[in-house]
Image: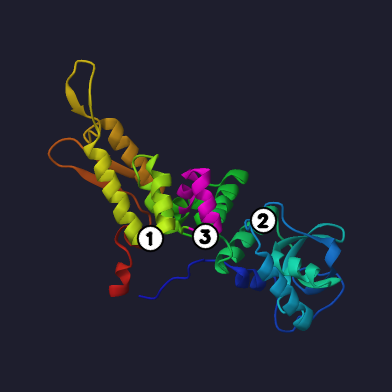
């Protein structure tokens, strides 16, 4: 089975949409979709740029390279006012070009609305792996809230599965102190998901510190999280007002099942129903297409289609 592209759209498709080919040349006039030389001071960064952190040392190295070789790949911009442009993709090259003292920068001017520009910016950063997991999650949240999109609509627009978007958004539930570890790369998205699996939220910083101090792998962090949850359950007994011992972690409780349904829906990005009464208990997970089914099975079972 052929593997699908991680992103259904991308910078290449934008180029095709704007008829940019090998015959395009550097110029100085107007023209959508052509490569122009723009005054570097007429270009500004996006206020909602998904990438928040730029490594100063890497910028300096890129600036040195640009001083010698020039800007080999044009940035992508959209005109927001006469002779004023806002970056859609390529802010790092623009910053480095300013450091290198360039007066002009090659740019492709796109005729795109704000939503499309936001999508291109996110796609470009994801494809280049420029975003840390938190920045990616924040970018998805911005698109969902600012443009009133559903996760399904966002999935269709940027070519990411709903489950991938839902899993990414869950990272925003972490405490600020843990999010900082994601930003700096001290923990990965896999580590973060292990932290989110902890039933006692006070255990999150404890496990996070252990991951960092001991350099735990994601698998080791997941195993330790399961161990901590088991310990929490064994201690989850209390005495009610009548002095009768009962287990707080009652898995037959309707509220508990409802919580699990919501967590499953957030994780998988699709409707989930759990029947937890009677002799037969089962889970129902909805899907729409064969591709949707493949994404669901991959999320639940791993790369099972590699065996086909």
The residue singled out by tag 2 in the image is: 49
Crowd tier of the residue under label 3, counting other residues whose Cα lies within 10 Å: few below 14, some 14–19, many 20 or above = few
The residue sitting at 44% across, 71% down in the picture is: 4
Check the image and name the residue furthest to the front.
Answer: 213
Q: Position of residue 128 (x, y in %)?
A: 58, 69
The residue singled out by tag 1 in the image is: 216
Tell me the element at label 3: loop
Q: Is 90 or 123 nearer to us in this picture? A: 90
| Whole-number angstrom distance, CA of label 3 to CA of label 1 | 14 Å
Answer yes or no: is residue 163 visible.
Answer: no
Crowd tier of the residue under label 1, counting other residues whose Cα lies within 10 Å: few below 14, some 14–19, many 20 or above = some
> What segment carries the magenta color?
168-186
- Foreground disc of the pair 2, 3: 3
The residue singled out by tag 3 in the image is: 185
Q: For the N terminus, which image quadrant?
A: bottom left
| Whole-number angstrom distance, CA of label 2 to CA of label 3 | 19 Å
Whether residue 178 is situated above or below residue 72 in the rendered picture? above
Q: Position of residue 163 (x, y in %)?
A: 42, 54
Residue 96 shown in magenta: no
- Foreground disc of the pair 2, 1: 1
Residue 181 shown in magenta: yes
Answer yes or no: is residue 83 visible.
Answer: yes
Principal SS element in the magenta part?
A: helix
The residue sitting at 19% across, 15% down in the picture is: 242
The residue sitting at 61% across, 46% down in the picture is: 147
Describe residue 19's horizontal placement relative to residue 158 as left or right. Answer: right
Tell me the element at label 1: loop
Describe residue 165's horizontal placement relative to residue 271 as left or right. Answer: right
């Amino acid at each position: 089975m052929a593997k699908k592209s991680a992103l259904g759209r991308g910078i290449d498709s934008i180029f095709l949409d704007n008829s940019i080919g090998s015959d395009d040349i550097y110029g100085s006039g107007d023209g959508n979709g052509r490569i122009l030389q723009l005054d570097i001071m007429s270009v500004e960064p996006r206020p909602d740029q998904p990438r928040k952190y730029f490594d100063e040392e890497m910028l300096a190295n890129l600036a040195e390279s640009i001083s010698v070789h020039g800007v080999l790949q044009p940035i992508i911009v959209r005109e927001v006012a006469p002779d004023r442009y806002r970056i859609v993709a390529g802010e790092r090259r623009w910053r480095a070009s300013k450091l290198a003292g360039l007066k002009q920068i090659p740019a492709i001017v796109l005729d795109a609305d704000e939503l499309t520009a936001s999508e291109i910016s996110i796609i470009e950063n994801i494809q280049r792996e420029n975003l840390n997991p938190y920045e990616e999650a924040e970018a998805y949240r911005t698109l969902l809230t600012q443009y009133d999109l559903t996760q399904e609509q966002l999935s269709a627009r940027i070519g990411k599965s709903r489950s991938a978007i839902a899993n990414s958004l869950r990272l925003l539930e972490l405490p600020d102190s843990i999010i900082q570890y994601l930003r700096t790369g001290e923990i990965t998205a896999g580590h973060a998901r292990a932290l989110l699996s902890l039933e006692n939220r006070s255990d999150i910083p404890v496990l996070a510190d252990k991951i960092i101090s001991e350099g735990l792998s994601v698998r080791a962090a997941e195993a330790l999280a399961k161990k901590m949850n088991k310990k929490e359950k064994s201690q989850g007994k209390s005495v009610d007002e009548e002095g009768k011992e009962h287990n707080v972690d009652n898995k037959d409780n309707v509220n508990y099942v409802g919580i699990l349904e919501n967590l499953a829906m957030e994780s998988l990005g699709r409707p989930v129903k759990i029947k937890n009464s009677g002799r037969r208990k089962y889970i129902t997970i909805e899907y729409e297409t064969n591709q949707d089914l493949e994404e669901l099975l991959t999320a639940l079972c791993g790369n099972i289609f590699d065996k086909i």
